Structures are given as structure tokens and as C-alpha cells.
């Protein structure tokens, strides 16, 4: 099929240089490289990601406060093993999703 439509984008000189280098490494011209990159890569949209990150930061702040209280002797026993396991699961899930979307 004959290609007749055009798409124009603006890039910085550094971006242009990186794209040209990658297309050369792939033994393709820039157009071929950009078309194949755009069509063949899966894009994963994680709508709730900002809220999840905010919640994880809040949990981290709470854990830091508990640690500070324990270190200063105000509280003596803090059981965080379950919380640590759950946080690890969440971070692993987020890491998997974000590496898939790159």
C-alpha cells in the first residue's frame, strides 16, 4: 500500500539525535523505526497510579512516625511484619506494571 499520509512531530535536537542513533542501530531509516516502534509497543495506562503512589507515601510516613516513636521509647512494641509483606507485594505489582509500560 502506498504511503500518502504524513504525521509531523516536534523534537529537541537531543531527541532527534537519539532517534536517529536508535534507527541506525536497528538498520532502519527514521520513518521505519518510528512506525514500528509506535505500532509494535504495547501502552499500558494505569489510571489509579498517582493515587496508589500517594497512599504508599502516606503509609511510609506512618511507618516512619512509628519508628521514631519506638526509637524514642514512647512506644515499645510495633508489629510491622504483615505491613512490610503487603507493601512489598504492592511495590512488586507497581514495578511490574511500570516496567511493562516503558
Image: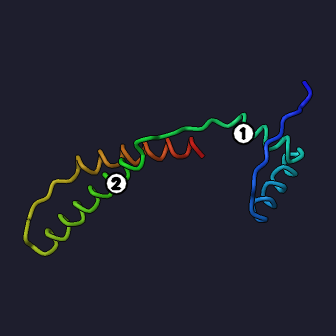
Instruction: Check the image and name the residue furthest to the top.
Output: 1
Query: Quick check: marks 1 and 2 in contact, CB under 8 Å?
Result: no
Q: Which mark is residue 38?
A: 1
Residue 42, quarter of the rendered image: top right
Image side of residue 73 versus residue 98, left or right: left
Measuring from the top left, give residue 20's x and y in whole percent: 84, 55
Q: Residue at left 52%, top 46%?
A: 98
Closer to the camera, 99 or 52?
Answer: 52
**From the viewer's perspective, is residue 58 above or below residue 4?**
below
39 or 100: which is nearer to us? 39
Residue at horizontal 8 percent and vertical 66 percent from the top: 75
Question: Percent position (x, y) of residue 52?
Answer: 36, 47
Q: In the image shown, does 19 or 70 lie closer to the viewer? A: 19
Crowding at mark 1 (Cα within 10 Å: few <14, some 14-19, many 20+)? few
The residue sitting at the bottom extreme is 72
* Disc 2: CA contacts within 10 A as few (<14), some (14-19) or many (>=20): few
Residue lying farthest right? Answer: 2
For residue 87, side relative to residue 99 (left or right):
left
Q: Quadrant of residue 14?
A: bottom right
Residue 89 x %, y %: 36, 43
Q: Give the image location of residue 85, x and y in percent.
A: 29, 46
In the picture, the quarter occupied by the N terminus is top right
In whole angstroms, how far apart are the C-alphas of marks 1 and 2? Answer: 30 Å
Which residue is at a point 32% across and 49% down the rendered structure image?
87
Q: Which secondary structure, mark 2?
A: helix
Task: Give the mark nearer the N terminus: 1 vs 2.
Answer: 1
Q: What element carries label 1?
A: helix
Question: Residue 84 vs residue 43: left or right?
Answer: left
Q: Which mark is residue 54?
A: 2
Amino acid at each position: 500500500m502506498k504511503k500518502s499520509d504524513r504525521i509531523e512531530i516536534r523534537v529537541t535536537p537531543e531527541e532527534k539525535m537519539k532517534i536517529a542513533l536508535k534507527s541506525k542501530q536497528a538498520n532502519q531509516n527514521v520513518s521505519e523505526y518510528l512506525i514500528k516502534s509506535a505500532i509494535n509497543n504495547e501502552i499500558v495506562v494505569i489510571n489509579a497510579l498517582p493515587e496508589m503512589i500517594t497512599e504508599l507515601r502516606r503509609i511510609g510516613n506512618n511507618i516512619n512516625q512509628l519508628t521514631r516513636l519506638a526509637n524514642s521509647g514512647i512506644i515499645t512494641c510495633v508489629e510491622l511484619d504483615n505491613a512490610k509483606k503487603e507493601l512489598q507485594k504492592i511495590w512488586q505489582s507497581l514495578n511490574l506494571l511500570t516496567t511493562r509500560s516503558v
